[in-house]
Amino acid sequence: MALYPSKFKNPLINWIDARLPIFTLMHHEYIEFQMPRNVNYLWAFGAIGMLLLMTMIATGIMLAMQYTPNTLLAFDSVEHIMRDVNYGWLLRYMHANAGAFFFLAIYVHIFRGLYYGSYQKPRELIWILGVLIYLLMMATGFLGYVLPWGQMSFWAATVITNLFSAFPVVGDPIVTWLWGGFSVDNPTLNRFFALHYLMPFVLLGVVLLHLSALHITGSNNPLGIEIKGPQDSVPFHPYVTIKDLFAFSVYLILFSVFLFFMPNYMGHPDNYIPANALVTPSHIVPEWYFLPWYAILRAIPDKLGGTVMMFAAVLVLVVLPWLDTSKVKSLVFKPVSRLFFWVFAADCILLGFCGANPPDGIWVVAARLGTIYYFAYFLVALPLLGKFERPRPRPASIAEAILKGGGSVHAHAATAQPMEKA
Amino acid sequence: MSTIAHPSGAGAAPGGGGGDASRRNFLYIATTAVGAAGLGAVAWPFINSMNPAADTLALASIEVDITTVKPGEQIVVTWQGKPVFIRRRTPDEITAAAQAKLEDMKDPQADSARVQKPEWLILVGICTHLGCVPNFDGKSSGHLGEFGGWFCPCHGSQYDTSGRIRKGPAPKNLGVPNYVFLKDTVIKIG
């Protein structure tokens, strides 16, 4: 009899845990798990992302019970949800707004990782899984946007699937295969619905891998110094659980403002016009969270080139852990890199505005300059900054910086060992 | 493993161990190859099921009566789910299309190769960039683009009065579908 020696007192829990130690696992990973004691509120955005994924799956399952994936019925079935289904309006607006908020939370999460060097060794694989999660989010978000079968849905489906036609030889057969026909039509909508239901569960699986890898290395922190002993860390519960719950409350207030007072603020009115294959709306734009990529696509005056650059702009993130040659994680200690980082952040917002505006005049120039800086940041600035910038001295440990410094890192930099490798 | 007696057949190498190892390797490779071929054979129906179904492929040709189209106007009809432009060109537009310099074009093609009768221009109305429907508004020339043809609202591609790409990101000219004039006023597309 080889049962697991469970420590739980409750006889039922003990009986289960001895045979399948899931309670021990959860206790180990979410109660005892050691978190750096200096993590700030930016570390709550992963948990907020998880809350949003749960919101999306829960509301999505309920919506799927009322929605019809057929070109003749889809638009009306969404209106049926809005007008007739009990709380249908609430479920649909939650789903639509939580989708946008999911991207918002993940963008904060990504930029936090960029600022504090969370992608550096030993967390490269966590980062790469994160890029994969982001790609799945983009695919899922796009597929879902098509389902209401309004004008923006239809033309988003047309433009995005046509991106693949840029590839020589295989392009057109791929597009026909994606469509299941010779234009975006009923077979396309039908399969997009099936895939939109599937993808979030694939995404959830990758999130679990992301978390499993995270629980091997532990979380990074604002100093970018690893935990060296018990004085540097606190248990996940209650310290981080309470902090995350407070962050949830603040997020839910903001979410509710959008949900109840301006539910269509992030939408596009043209999507309340049923899809029409013969009329393209005069100004089509993607959802705000795709605008920077859209700007890069349009910045290149060549179909294949634009498509390749757009995919490359996302995929360059995969190799980021090896492009950044610095041994110091956090930008707190690298003032020159910090400057480049903030210009990069501003550049992403600039590209967003370029994507939202029609492609002429100053916006074309701005999109091209923005695209150049985007790639230069990863391919030129980060490799060189890591080699040539001399980081400021770092404190010897997390505990030292916090307990002696009263929050200020720089005041005690003199006592730190210079260039110490954590 | 040497204690297991392997049957000695035609394929068994003399000398025991070495022969057994290579035979095992052969079996591993053969098993893997058969398995991979089997998986591929099973995967193909799954992948191919997403290609156009028989009823989609069977979408027939259409016949269009063009009696009511006046010079300078176009009508849009649906063929295989796609918009098809039928434009009756004015003499000025025909001249402009015929005299445009081919060396200025991204996808050079003579106007005469794109029409059966110069007055009637018949095109698949899908921008070759990313599939939007280019605008045509004969009344307000601002929507025709610089070349008097079509202007794509999505990414600014401009086509001339022969439907050839002249400016913007689209790589090719607007497509010309197969069509025949059944009568002077009726065409069959497809």
Image (tube, coloured by chain):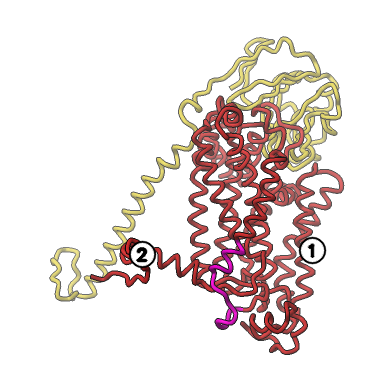
Chain colours: A red, B yellow
Residue A189 quadrant: top right
Q: Residue at x 80, y 16 (%)?
A: B71
Q: Position of residue A274 (x, y in %)?
A: 65, 27
Q: Which residue is mark 2?
A: A10
In contact (CB < 8 Å): disc 1 and disc 2: no
Question: Range of the magenta residues?
Answer: A226-244
- State the residue in front, B15 or A311: A311
Residue A332 quadrant: bottom right
Q: Position of residue A121 (x, y in %)?
A: 59, 74
Does the magenta-highlighted stretch encompass residue A228?
yes
Left or right, A43 with reference to A14: right
Position above or below: A32 against A349? below
The N terminus of chain A, quarter of image: bottom left
The C terminus of chain A, quarter of image: bottom right
- Chain under disc 1: A
Q: CA distance from mark 1 to mark 2?
A: 56 Å
Closer mark to the observer between disc 1 and disc 2: 2
Position above or below: A89 against A407? above
Position above or below: A315 against A356? below
Q: Looking at numbered disc 1 in the image, what kind of residue is underneath it? A: Val
Q: Which residue is mark 1?
A: A343
- State the residue in front, A356 or B41: A356
- Chain under disc 2: A
